[in-house]
Each structure stands twice: as structure tokens, then as C-alpha cells.
């Protein structure tokens, strides 16, 4: 394990050693857990809430036949799916909402809970009323939405028969059809910069943006990618069945853990409100805090600019990259790095706000296709953006 990770033990008790399925942090800091008291690997039949170090255990007020699959805590009410049946929880009172046949994906976005189903599209509940969002439209295959996710704008993302689909303003858009390609999507994760990261069954990570995608990396062991979580220090956390990888633009990839093995598979990965990451295994859970590496790029280890904006266009690019900086302060320099943390090009700074990178290195050679990091140093502070270069 790399020295850039600070491991913080949070909670582990013999009461929770039976097949811990899921941990979901609420926006106010509580942790919701689903677990089973049958071993080994039984379906989760109970849940617990950890708040300020206190643990409250709850038993489902009716027989559970297929396990509590997905918990959604919200400020007003919480939600849970029991295989296909969906409930609203208020003061530990369960209210049946609907039967979705089978749920394998859920989320909470803009005060609404979303659940997918095997045949009924997406069930949406706003706290008072529920309705179904039919996804059986031209260009899709069947009324099914897998791997529900949403970006910062509220746009809904999901898969349909290996198609990447988005939904906003009552309009469905097939963003990209991966059918017939070498990629089978296993997870969707919208990034803060507007791109969408995709995990595949064979360990490939793709980045989709502006109608096109690029292959970002292939993980060791080519294990299926189940989750991609973006940290607060530009790091990206990637969970497979048996390992967690952490990527940072300055240090590349590091393996956080692989020693658990198949006898103790990883169940979930989630970011807490304070930026720490919590990792769930069937036998307990652990919390990690990422500290950005200081060995690489020592001249850019400074706080980020708060009153400046950097844009790159086009992205992806097949030629020149236009760089625009909106700030009333002088730009000291621009630097371009590759994903290994190696300096590719330095662009002298000035009071000019528009720059051009010709996608060449310091020797004038065209760079290879891939992802590059553009850093702008502005009066001792920096901002950065990723850009995809294609030939």
C-alpha cells in the first residue's frame, strides 16, 4: 500500500460480521448499513444506522425473502428496495410503494428517489407521489435502465443493452452504442468536469465526452469495474470485485488493496461528506483519507484558484487545443503533463487570457493519443483541466 493513503479505522463489530452488503452515507454524516445474520453470504435482512459513534440496529418489520438490496437515506425520508419491492421509511415506519419486479440500481437526485426494474423502466418517487418513466423508446432495446447515475446538472445516465443513454428535460438521448465493440459496460460515473467515466467487465476504463470516448486505462488482472468514485483531491477511486485502485494525475495508478481475496469480496465504495472514502467488505468496513502526493510537481502543490476558470476546446481534440482563462490575475505559466506525471510542454505565461497548445511536446513532436493534464499557475495558485488528444 502506498504511503499516500491515511487509513482511518471507523467501526468494526462482531455484530456485523455476517455478510455486510452495503454502506450508504447520508448527506448529514450518518451511515446506513444492510447486513445479514446468516453465514456465509446470506441475503441482508437487517439494517443499522451509525450516527455520531452510536449504532442503532433495526429489524425489518416483515419477513424478508430476498434481502435488502439498496438503501437510500435522504433528509426527509429514506428508501429501501427488497429485491423488487420498494419501501419508504419514516421514523422506522415502513410504507410500501410499489413492486418493481427486480431492482439492481437506485439513486437519489434532486429530491427524488430512482429505482430501475427488469421490465418497467425507472420508478421515480418525489416523497409524495410515484410514477414510472418509460424508457422503451426508439433507439433502445426493451424497457430497462441499468446502472442509474446522475451528474451535477441533474441529467440521468443509464445503460440499455450496452447503450449509454442520458435523460434530461423529458428527452432521452442515446449518447453512444457500445454494442458490437469490445466493451461491455459495468458502471457509469459522471465526473465533476462534465465527462462520464465508464467501467467495463474486462477491466477497461473509458472516458466519454462530447459524443466520443477514449480508453483511459486497463487495470491489472482485467477484473470487472464495479464503481468509480471521484475524490476531493483530484484522485479517482476504482473498485473491482477484489481490489481498489486509486489514480491521481500526479502519481498515476496505485493499488490500494488486493489482499482480501475472493473469500472476502468488496461490497461497496462511497465518499463521506468530509471527503473520506469508506470501503465495505463482507466482514467489515474501513475508511481511507487520500493525501495528494508531494513528490511530483512540487511547484504546483498549492491551493486551487477560486476566482478563475479554465476551459479547453475542442475536447477531444485532433489538432490544436484552445485554452481560455477567465481571471483578472496574471498567468505565470501553463504546463501540460501526461498521466505518468511527466512534463510534456511548458507554455510561457502572460497577461493574455487565450492560449493555444499545438499538441506537440518540447521537442516539437506530436504527442500520442491519450489524456493530458493542463495546469495553469496564476499568482502562486493553480487550476487544471484534462484534455483528450486523438490522432
Image (cartoon, helix red, strand yellow):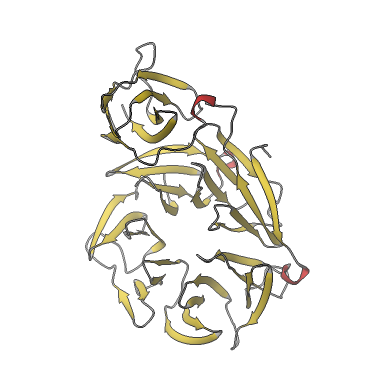
Percent x, y of residue 380: 44, 28
Q: Is residue 175 left or right of residue 111?
A: left
How many numbered marks appear? 0
The residue that appears at 68% across and 62% down in the rendered structure is 282
The residue that appears at 46% across and 79% down in the rendered structure is 86
The residue that appears at 40% across and 28% down in the rendered structure is 379
Q: Is residue 263 left or right of residue 380?
A: right
Please state which of residues 182 and 312 is positioned toward the viewer in this rendering. Answer: 312
Q: Where does the C terminus fall, quadrant-wise?
A: top left
Q: Is residue 320 visible?
A: no
Percent x, y of residue 144: 36, 67
Question: Is the residue 303 above or below the residue 196 in the image?
Answer: above
Q: Quadrant of residue 163?
A: bottom left
Q: Quadrant of residue 152?
A: bottom left
Question: Is the residue 149 above or below the residue 383 in the image?
Answer: below
Q: Is residue 269 visible?
A: yes
Q: Where does the N terminus fall, quadrant-wise?
A: top right
Percent x, y of residue 118: 41, 71
Question: Is the residue 302 above or below the residue 93 in the image?
Answer: above
Question: Is the residue 294 above or below the residue 291 in the image?
Answer: above
The residue that appears at 59% across and 65% down in the rendered structure is 23
Percent x, y of residue 168: 26, 61
Please, which residue is most extreme toward the top here? Answer: 363
Please state which of residues 246 and 84 is positioned toward the viewer in this rendering. Answer: 246
Amino acid at each position: 500500500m502506498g504511503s499516500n493513503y491515511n487509513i482511518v479505522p471507523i467501526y468494526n463489530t462482531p455484530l456485523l460480521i455476517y455478510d455486510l452488503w452495503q454502506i450508504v452515507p447520508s448527506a448529514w454524516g450518518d451511515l446506513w448499513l444492510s447486513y445479514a445474520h446468516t453465514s456465509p453470504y446470506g441475503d441482508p435482512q437487517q439494517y443499522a444506522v451509525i450516527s455520531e459513534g452510536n449504532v442503532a440496529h433495526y429489524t425489518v418489520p416483515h419477513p424478508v425473502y430476498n434481502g435488502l438490496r439498496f438503501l437510500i437515506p435522504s433528509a426527509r425520508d429514506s428508501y429501501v428496495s427488497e429485491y423488487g419491492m420498494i419501501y419508504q421509511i419514516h421514523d422506522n415506519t415502513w410504507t410500501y410503494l410499489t413492486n418493481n419486479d427486480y431492482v439492481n440500481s437506485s439513486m437519489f437526485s434532486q429530491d427524488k428517489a430512482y429505482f430501475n426494474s427488469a421490465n418497467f423502466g425507472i420508478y421515480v418517487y418525489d416523497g409524495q407521489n410515484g410514477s414510472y418513466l418509460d424508457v422503451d423508446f426508439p433507439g433502445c432495446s426493451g424497457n430497462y435502465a441499468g446502472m442509474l447515475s446522475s451528474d451535477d446538472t441533474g441529467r440521468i445516465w443509464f445503460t440499455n443493452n450496452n447503450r449509454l443513454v442520458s435523460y434530461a428535460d423529458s428527452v432521452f438521448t442515446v449518447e453512444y452504442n457500445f454494442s458490437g465493440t469490445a466493451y461491455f459496460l459495468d458502471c457509469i460515473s459522471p465526473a465533476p468536469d462534465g465527462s462520464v467515466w465508464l467501467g467495463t467487465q474486462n477491466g477497461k476504463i473509458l472516458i466519454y465526452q462530447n459524443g466520443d470516448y477514449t480508453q483511459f486505462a486497463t487495470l491489472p488482472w482485467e477484473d470487472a469495474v464495479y464503481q468509480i468514485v471521484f475524490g476531493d483531491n483530484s484522485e479517482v477511486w476504482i473498485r473491482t470485485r477484489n481490489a481498489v485502485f486509486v489514480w491521481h494525475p500526479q502519481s498515476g495508478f496505485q493499488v490500494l488493496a488486493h489482499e482480501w481475496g475472493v473469500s472476502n469480496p468488496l461490497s461497496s465504495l462511497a465518499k463521506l461528506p468530509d471527503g473520506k472514502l469508506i470501503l465495505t467488505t463482507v466482514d467489515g468496513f474501513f475508511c481511507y483519507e487520500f493525501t495528494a502526493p508531494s513528490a511530483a510537481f512540487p511547484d504546483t502543490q498549492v491551493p486551487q484558484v477560486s476566482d478563475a476558470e479554465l476551459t479547453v476546446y475542442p475536447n477531444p481534440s485532433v489538432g490544436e487545443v484552445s485554452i481560455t482563462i477567465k481571471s483578472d490575475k496574471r498567468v505565470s505559466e501553463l504546463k501540460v503533463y501526461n498521466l505518468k506525471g511527466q512534463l510534456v510542454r511548458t507554455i510561457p505565461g502572460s497577461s493574455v487570457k487565450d492560449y493555444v497548445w499545438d499538441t506537440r511536446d518540447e521537442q516539437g513532436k506530436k504527442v500520442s493519443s491519450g489524456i493530458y493534464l493542463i495546469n495553469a499557475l496564476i499568482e502562486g495558485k493553480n487550476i487544471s483541466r484534462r484534455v483528450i488528444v486523438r490522432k
